[in-house]
Amino acid sequence: GAGVSQSPSNKVTEKGKDVELRCDPISGHTALYWYRQSLGQGLEFLIYFQGNSAPDKSGLPSDRFSAERTGGSVSTLTIQRTQQEDSAVYLCASSLGGTSGFWETQYFGPGTRLLVL
Amino acid sequence: AQSVAQPEDQVNVAEGNPLTVKCTYSVSGNPYLFWYVQYPNRGLQFLLKYITGDNLVKGSYGFEAEFNKSQTSFHLKKPSALVSDSALYFCAVRDMEDTGRRALTFGSGTRLQVQP
């Protein structure tokens, strides 16, 4: 079946521009996560959505980063006024959500590779 | 707070030999533990997880991991390595007691290189 999809797969932008990254979770998954993987680093949590609940934004590194999830499905991560240190691979994951959320498996998309010049 | 350590940046092993990729964790309560693999220019693929019960967990592609509570470890193992196992491996943890946090905490990753 269809997995998590992300677009674009690659994005090159100039410092100071805004970018939008898109994530389509697996159908029926109510939980959605954004992570960032910087060169030579592990994965860093950014934000988590669960159904219609208020998102957990505790991982967003600055107020230039924001995300929304429309209709409980597709999510968009927006980075305003991009900086060179924002260059990374941005990974989206989804999971079933619900009461078993703490041990359920997260399924990852292929990521968006962002390069800020 | 929860954390994961993968002490080896890279592990080299000959094809056909057993492999071990190490992971230790720190949580306040009891852990849920996961292993993921990342092939070049791909997202993370789930390998296996420990929730409770049997300390030896079997997963995809012949991998297994052993949960050791006294040593706070969750090492990934495979009896016979394949060249195709060469990839980046991530260990991750979620603290069962931290009900406010659903995200996983990942280690820094270990690159496995299997030589023919």
Image: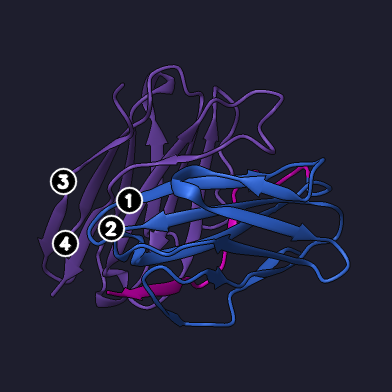
Chain colours: A purple, B blue
Q: Residues within 10 Å of mark 1 (few under 14, many from 20)?
A: many
Q: Give the alpha-carbon distance from disc 2 to disc 1, as whole Å.
A: 24 Å
Camera-side residue of B93 and A58: B93
Q: Residues within 10 Å of mark 4 (few under 14, many from 20)?
A: few
Kind of element beneath mark 1: loop
Q: Which mark is residue A80?
A: 2
Q: Are marks 2 and 3 on the same chain?
A: yes
Q: Which mark is residue B43?
A: 1
Kind of element beneath mark 4: loop
Q: Give the alpha-carbon distance from disc 2 to disc 3, as whole Å.
A: 17 Å
Look at label 1 and name its amino acid.
Answer: Gly
Q: Which residue is mark 3?
A: A8
Chain letter, disc 4 residue:
A
Mark nearer the viewer, 1 or 3: 1
Q: Which residue is mark 4?
A: A17
Kind of element beneath mark 2: loop
Mark nearer the viewer, 3 or 4: 3
Mark nearer the viewer, 2 or 1: 1
**Stretch of the chain drawn in magenta:** B99-116
Let me know if residue A16 is in the magenta part.
no
Q: Are marks 1 and 3 on the same chain?
A: no
Kind of element beneath mark 3: loop
Camera-side residue of A45 and A14: A45
Query: Residue placed at 36% from the left, 71% from the top?
Result: B15
Q: Give the alpha-carbon distance from disc 1 to disc 3, as whole Å.
A: 14 Å
Chain letter, disc 1 residue:
B
Q: Position of residue A21 (x, y in %)?
A: 25, 46
The reply, left or right, for residue A64 in relation to residue A29 is left
